[in-house]
Image (tube, rainbow, N blue to C red):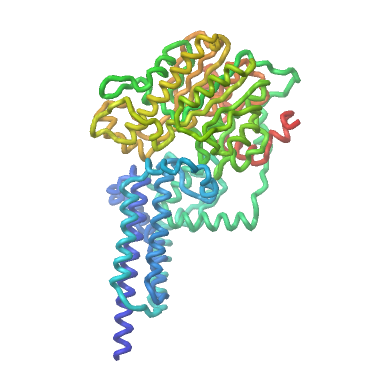
């Protein structure tokens, strides 16, 4: 009787720990879901019983499964370790999603070196949910300490809990909640039941972001972790699938290429490309609380004889700045998962740099395999970074020195850095937005003001050198910085201060000053980052370049409304072309 009483007491302890651990993991999954997908009104689930059941079943499944092993272990200390690992995984994914609209996978982990010098930027994306999730491990620690004594294995209770986990899986699969994901096109080969253990990977590259989000909404971030592990274990065994360029693919490529007539293309103007880190278009034309212009020089530029596009959709994926540079320089779209500049940096790429005898890149840091990929794009010299100060005035001083010595015709690309998160490289801030204004947003706008002043000073210096007479100057952003989750959080400030902060997606601006543009041209329609490449080709007189890119010349209104390829097709085909090194095998660039 005494032994039976001791066993019952131990079972009681294990049940307490099991229930506590299960509820905490369940709560973490729900908080994670809210942090990343808060646009889904939880109250609406009450009006859709199947969605309500599937939502909680999908979050309960990993919680019960993980906690069930409490009945098979003698001690509870391992729950603390597992809790901390879950915390770190969820917090890392919240930060990564807020920064990239993507979730972490093995490719993201492999590119962690690109964070050297930028680790402080993660604080820009930490929110209250991150801190709440971290605090739950404290509760697990307290329970593990208070519930003393060793446990006794109970296979019966473990079997019951595993059965409950399986039941949760079946319920989730049968109910199959879709939530509000109509904006994410579902591939034909996506599984019917979203609660399946492993997320398949056969879809078009560019839409992985939305489909991965859709998968996580229908299951949980913990199932996604296991799915990624299984996927990469399978890939390590079976290897990379063979890339097949089908007849349909070749037909699409033929629409975007020109058969060379062996006549060399001589650019009609020099080319100066300024890629501004994290430049978004909505602040241009706005002022601070003291009526001081945020981007006075950019505003002045777009009011002159130039092409100005206010809604350039950023098409970067996991490669962020590296992807942005690739899209603009090559007219291709990114691969996913991974980044082309890292995984395929030695490929042959098309680029307008090939047309110039003198072409170079100025970059303030070594991230994204910059030295190797610049050479692959065709740039034949570069200003390698010194210890970075994070000051764009240094970048533009280097650019001015470069232009003073380079021979014409030339193509020079300069990449800025001061607007990189967490927006703390500028020093003193000149703009004021009010005491209750979001601190990160205020710092971003101050950094934009600083970079804008650097651009203005630079243009003023070169204007007297008659450089503008025969130079096409392109100013655009490599990508946006505020993704959908943060944009929604800014809406209270947008309403209070009457700022046109977009609700779901922000855009980069595109400003092109060129001898070929004789009047002010403003395009407020939705355009794409892949459109910049063919537009530059047109401005420098290189319309006959063999590769047209996936986009269109934005100065051609007919082409803008009659695209030869959809964005989805472009992502899928570009992924195949990059992975197969198509340009090495099909163009004279490889010679």
Q: Name the quadrant containing residue 407.
A: top right
Residue 4 place in picture, x, y as percent: 32, 87
Residue drawn at the location 41% of the way across and 64% of the way down: 81
Residue 41 place in picture, x, y as percent: 30, 45
Q: Is residue 201 visible?
A: yes
Q: Is residue 483 visible?
A: no
310 to 124, vertically: above or below:
above
State the residue in front, 528 or 197: 528
Residue 131 place in picture, x, y as percent: 32, 51
State the residue in front, 370 or 545: 370
Quadrant containing the N terminus is: bottom left
- Relative placement, left or right, of 501 versus 276 is left
Count of number-bearing discs: 0
571 to 96, vertically: above or below:
above
Residue 230 place in picture, x, y as percent: 54, 58
Residue drawn at the location 42% of the way across and 69% of the way down: 162
């Amino acid at each position: 009787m005494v032994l039976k009483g001791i066993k019952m007491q131990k079972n009681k302890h294990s049940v307490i720990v099991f229930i506590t651990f299960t509820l905490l993991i369940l709560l973490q999954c729900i908080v994670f879901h809210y942090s990343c997908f808060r646009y889904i009104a939880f109250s609406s689930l009450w009006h859709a019983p199947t969605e309500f059941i599937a939502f909680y079943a999908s979050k309960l499944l990993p919680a019960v499964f993980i906690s069930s092993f409490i009945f098979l272990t003698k001690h509870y200390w391992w729950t603390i370790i597992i809790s901390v690992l879950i915390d770190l995984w969820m917090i890392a994914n919240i930060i990564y999603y807020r920064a990239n609209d993507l979730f972490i996978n093995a490719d993201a982990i492999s590119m962690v070196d690109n964070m050297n010098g930028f680790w402080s930027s993660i604080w820009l994306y930490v929110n209250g949910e991150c801190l709440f999730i971290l605090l739950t491990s404290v509760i697990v620690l307290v329970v593990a300490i208070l519930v003393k004594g060793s446990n006794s294995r109970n296979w019966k209770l473990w079997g019951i809990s595993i059965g409950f986990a399986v039941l949760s899986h079946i319920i989730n699969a049968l109910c199959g909640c879709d939530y509000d994901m109509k904006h994410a096109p579902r591939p034909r080969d996506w599984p019917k039941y979203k609660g399946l253990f492993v997320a398949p990977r056969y879809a078009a590259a560019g839409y992985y972001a939305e489909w991965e989000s859709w998968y996580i909404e229908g299951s949980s971030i913990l199932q996604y972790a296991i799915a990624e592990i299984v996927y990469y274990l399978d890939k390590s065994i079976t290897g990379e699938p063979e890339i097949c360029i089908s007849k349909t693919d070749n037909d699409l490529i033929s629409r975007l290429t020109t058969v060379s007539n062996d006549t060399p293309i001589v650019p009609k103007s020099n080319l100066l490309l300024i890629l501004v880190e994290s430049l978004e278009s909505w602040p241009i034309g706005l002022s601070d609380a003291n009526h001081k212009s945020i981007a006075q020089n950019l505003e002045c530029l777009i009011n002159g004889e130039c092409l100005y596009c206010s809604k350039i959709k950023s098409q970067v994926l996991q490669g962020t700045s590296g992807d942005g540079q690739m899209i603009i320089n090559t007219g291709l779209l990114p691969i996913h998962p991974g980044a082309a500049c890292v995984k395929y940096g030695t490929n042959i790429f098309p680029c307008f740099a090939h047309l110039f005898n003198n072409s170079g890149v100025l970059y303030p840091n070594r991230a994204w395999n910059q030295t190797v990929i610049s050479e692959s794009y065709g740039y034949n010299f570069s200003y390698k970074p010194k210890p970075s100060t994070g000051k764009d005035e240094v970048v533009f001083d280097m650019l001015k020195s470069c232009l003073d010595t380079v021979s014409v015709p030339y193509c020079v690309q300069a990449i800025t850095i001061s607007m990189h998160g967490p927006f703390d490289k500028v020093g003193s801030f000149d703009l004021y937005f009010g005491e209750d204004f979001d601190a990160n947003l205020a710092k971003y706008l101050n950094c934009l003001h600083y970079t804008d002043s650097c651009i203005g000073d630079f243009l003023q210096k070169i204007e007297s050198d008659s450089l503008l007479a025969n130079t096409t100057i392109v100013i655009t952003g490599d990508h946006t910085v505020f993704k959908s989750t943060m944009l929604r959080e800014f809406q209270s400030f947008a309403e209070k201060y009457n700022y046109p902060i977009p609700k779901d997606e922000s855009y980069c601006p595109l400003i092109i000053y060129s001898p070929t543009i004789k009047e002010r041209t403003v395009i407020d329609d939705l355009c794409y980052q892949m459109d910049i490449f063919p537009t530059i080709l047109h401005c420098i007189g290189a319309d006959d370049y063999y590769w047209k890119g996936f986009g269109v010349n934005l100065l051609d209104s007919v082409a803008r409304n009659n695209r030869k390829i959809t964005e989805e097709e472009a992502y899928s085909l570009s992924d195949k072309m990059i992975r197969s090194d198509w340009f090495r095998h099909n163009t004279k660039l490889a010679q």
